[in-house]
Image: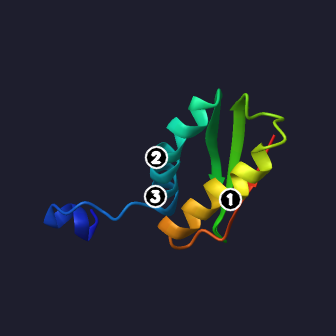
Amino acid sequence: MTQAAQTGESAAPSLRERVQGVLNLIRPAVQADGGDIELVDVDESGVVHVRFHGACHGCPSSTMTLQHGIERNLRERVPGVTRVVPVT
């Protein structure tokens, strides 16, 4: 049993959980444009792998959305995120 479990405290959220939380905040804006974003992986070096769905998949603006919206938000709100890359 972990010390947090023994004392009744909750463990700090993992990097993946913190990234997912920020993506959940961003998701409504992406969905408003007919798309969606899925968290695929967060590797040990802080690289976040995401997959676009719906209108975002193949959209020329998705690169700009990724770099200026999603990556900026994640890097500002989640220490440890180094970059965000799309996967197919």
Number of the label disc, if any, that sits on residue 18? 3
CA distance for labels 2 and 3: 11 Å
Q: Disc 1 or 3, which lies upstream in sequence?
A: 3
Number of the label disc, if any, that sits on residue 25? 2
User: Mark 3: which secondary structure?
Assistant: helix
User: Mark 2: which secondary structure?
Assistant: helix
Does residue 16 appear left or right of residue 69 in this picture? left
Number of the label disc, if any, that sits on residue 31? none
CA distance for labels 1 and 3: 19 Å
Q: Residue at x 53, y 69 (%)?
A: 76
Query: Quadrant location of the N terminus?
Result: bottom left
Q: Disc 2 or 3, which lies upstream in sequence?
A: 3
Q: Amino acid at mark 2?
A: Leu
Q: Amino acid at mark 1?
A: His
- The mark closer to the camera, 2 or 3, is 2
Number of the label disc, if any, that sits on residue 68? 1
CA distance for labels 2 and 1: 15 Å
What is the quadrant of residue 38 in the picture? Answer: top right
Q: Residue at x 79, y 44 (%)?
A: 61
On screen, 31 above or below 27?
Answer: above
Q: Amino acid at mark 3?
A: Arg
On screen, 50 above or below 59?
Answer: below
Q: Residue at x 50, y 62 (%)?
A: 15
Please count the marks in the image.
Answer: 3
